Amino acid sequence: MNIYFSGSIRGAEPRKSWFQTLIKHLGKHGKVLTENSFDFSYEEEIKFDDRWIWDRDIMWLNEADVLVAEVTSPSLGVGYEIGKAEDLDKPILCLYLCNEKKLSAMIGGSKYLKVVKYKEDHQAMQAIDDFLSALTTS
Ligand code: 6IA
């Protein structure tokens, strides 16, 4: 299974170590196409041409069987990828750590997405296992 993991990079508060934990966990279910996208320093990140990043990410989105997005930190890029994936009819799981801010209604209210609000890390892992296992058995 090709998995597209999506999370904030230039958006609010990228949670790099949590993303690495999620990517490692997703790797038990298939190939994470974006596994290296979140392993960067700011100095490295600005070396990449934006058009090149867009072309490659859109290619991966087309190749993906599923999108898993960490949506706790607001990000234009993550919202854009979720919208694209919806149009491509990809199954989409959004993970949101419960906090004092409210999730965007365009994510929380979409009937095309599965949104899981978690309080503990293990709940996010369990949501991934449940969502991806259901896809492989259906
Ligand atoms: O608006 P944002 O930057 O927060 O958007 C983040 C989303 O856009 C992620 O889910 C990525 O899939 C995609 N994205 C944004 N910037 C990059 C990027 N920069 N590389 C890959 N995908 C990106 C270069 C990082 C490189 C140094 C490892």
Image (tube, rainbow, N blue to C red):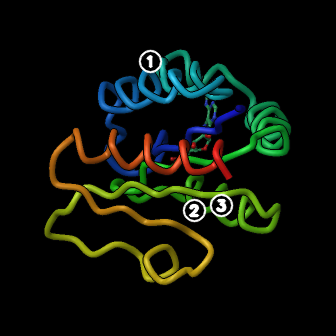
Q: Which residue is mark 1?
A: 41
Q: Which residue is mark 2?
A: 79
Q: In this rendering, which labeled residue sits more in front, label 2 or label 1?
A: 2
The crowd level at tag 3 (other Cα within 10 Å; few <14, some 14-19, many 20+) is few
User: Residue 111's spot in the image, x, y percent?
Assistant: 57, 81
- Distance between the alpha carbons at the discs numbered 3 and 2: 4 Å
- Distance between the alpha carbons at the discs numbered 2 and 1: 22 Å
The crowd level at tag 1 (other Cα within 10 Å; few <14, some 14-19, many 20+) is few
State the residue in front, 123 or 49.
Answer: 123
- Numbered circle sitting on residue 80: 3
Q: Which quadrant would residue 119 be assigned to in this image?
A: bottom left
Q: Is mark 3 within 8 Å of ligand 1?
A: yes
Q: Secondary structure at mark 3?
A: helix
58 sits to left or right of 96: right
Q: Is mark 2 within 8 Å of ligand 1?
A: no
Q: Is mark 1 within 8 Å of ligand 1?
A: yes
Type of amino acid under label 1: Ser
Q: Secondary structure at mark 2?
A: helix
State the residue in front, 132 or 93.
Answer: 132
User: Residue 107's spot in the image, x, y percent?
Assistant: 49, 73
The crowd level at tag 2 (other Cα within 10 Å; few <14, some 14-19, many 20+) is some
Type of amino acid under label 3: Tyr
State the residue in front, 47 or 122.
Answer: 122
120 sits to left or right of 102: left
State the residue in front, 102 or 77.
Answer: 102
Q: Which quadrant would residue 110 be assigned to in this image?
A: bottom right
Tell me what residue is drawn at x 25 percent, y 47 percent: 123
